[in-house]
Image (cartoon, rainbow, N blue to C red):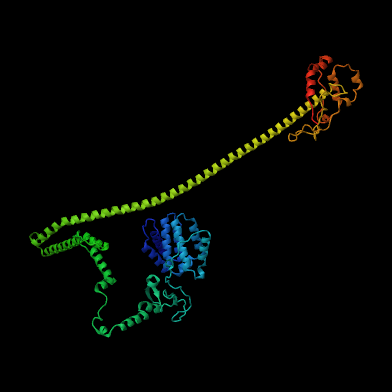
Amino acid sequence: MFRTGSNFDKLLDKATSHLLMEPDWPSILQLCDLIRQNDVLPKYALNAVKKKLFSQNQHTALYALQVLESMVKNCGYPLHEELTTRPFCDTLFELAKTTPHENVRQKLLELIQAWNFAFRKSPKHVALKDTMILMKSDGFKFPTFRESDAMFSADSAPEWADGDVCHRCRITFGLLQRKHHCRACGQVFCGQCSQKTTTLPKYGIEKEVRVCDACYDQATKPSAASKAAAEKQESELPPEYLNSSLAQQSQTPPRKTRYLNRSYWESVNQNESSEVRAASPSAPATAPVTETKLKHKENGVVDNDLEDFITTLKSQVEIFINRMKSNSSRGRSIANDTSVQTLFMNITAMHSKLLRYIQQHDDSRLHYERLQDKLTQVKDARAALDDLRDEHREKLRREAEEAERQRQLQMAHKLEIMRKKKQEYLQYQRQLALQRIQEQEREMQMRQEHQKQQYLMGYMGANQFPQSQPPPNTAPPQTAYHGFQYGQAMLPQSAPQMGHPGVQPPMPHQMPPPPPHFQQMPNYGVHQIANQQMMSLPSPMAGAIPMQAPPQNPGVPPQAQIQQPQQGEKTEARTAELISFDD
């Protein structure tokens, strides 16, 4: 078993070599014969092929698939059962997903589809059907199916039956009576009923195996159907032809019969090999002549001139040798034998031509050796090219991954820059909003200051005239706007409108008299009294804008401080006359 397994491994290595230019069919058929003869178990064969399927070289994987296809087509039911087991189907599914070679994947998908169609009616092969469904769900696209690829009807030897008695003579097996199996029918027989051996070509068994007597008779004798067909064919011939001498002759052409006679060709080969081994050492020139003749026969190329020259030279040499042996046995001198001298001269003349033929043969041999070397170099270059292609493919994959990574980094960098710009823009918008709010607040303060100044200037202009009459050509001042309260905050959206009466301050003639301490004080001027009265009056702005007394300059007499605004008294009076409010 171990020797057979090693032979199977050697044949498998030879059939799946990456140096092959085309499938090695003789080795593949030998592998199938080893499995059909039960020399190798189907499980061992599939495990060996599985190792080749996962090879990194795509040619080895393709040849392994070719071997597997031939084994499934030729090795019958035992291999089919082992092929459709769940572990091996999972292995095929894994190979389809992980292989980097597209041609290997397409070939595998084609085989799985063909096997699934061939085993569709058998419930034992459901694992292969499930594998194909899973592959379709994963997105594998199967090629166009051809029914001619799904022909797996191969005859295989039947399984061995078991029993305690002989299937023919019913003798019981025991310690002295051994049990034997017939390789043709699979039944169990005793030694007396299974003594004969024969080949079983229909099961792929080319060696002699043990069979029972009935199977031996059936294998060696023509069948009844063939006899009936022959009799029917003979009965259809006319009786005149059957009674003639022509019908008694062989119908096979003599030349074809000679070519189909296997024993004849085996005897011819044995005779030629014996002639080569029995060549005399005294005639060294005859050995290469015979080898050249054999080589020409093997190659199927015949050179007529060379064949004639070899035949003539061989006859001359044989005659020369026989003549010399005859003279030597009789004690004659070869120097006086004219026939020996003539033969020697003829052989010497033919020697130069023989040397020329030998030189041509050597040149041809060198030429073919160079071609063989070039073929080996081509195979090595092909293997190196495959490796370089794999390296280039891997390099392209790494470059694509690096480019993708750089693109991701650039996108992340751009996103970060855009985020920063967005933050800066939001900060800028916030600052603009704050500036607008501050400008609005300043504008409100300026409006409030302006209104306060107008209010104060209106009161100061009114206090320059007597309390009993208003200033000439002036209307009573209106110190408030319609719907506007000085105690409320002023917004830029609601500016006060002029000409609408509001809350009016008390007129000068309605003002109460100054307190006693103001009456006792010396009269420093009208402005001082007006300022004191204005400070003492309640106003709508009192709650919002506190009024302050004019600052006192230290070191300056009070009279000088009071008389400072008298210099612009006429200007202020004129300004008060111009201020008027519409009703």
Image-quadrant location for residue 44: bottom left
Can residue 337 be seen in the rendering of this structure?
no
Q: Which residue: 46% across, 54% down?
A: 100
Q: Which residue is depicted at the point 51% across and 65% down?
A: 129
Foreground pick, 415 / 568: 568
Q: Number of numbered discs present?
A: 0
* Image spot of residue 515 (x, y percent): 91, 22
Residue 528 vs 354, above or below: the answer is above
Quarter of the image where the C terminus is located: top right
Quarter in which the N terminus is drawn: bottom left
Q: Nearer the viewer, residue 493 or 115?
A: 493
Up/down of 508 relative to 24, above or below: above
Tell me: 573 left or right of 235. right
In front: 529, or 503? 503
In the depicted structure, whether residue 494 falls above or below residue 469: below
Q: For this view, does 577 lie left or right of residue 390?
A: right
- Which residue is drawn at the image coordinates 76% and 27% (left, top)? 450
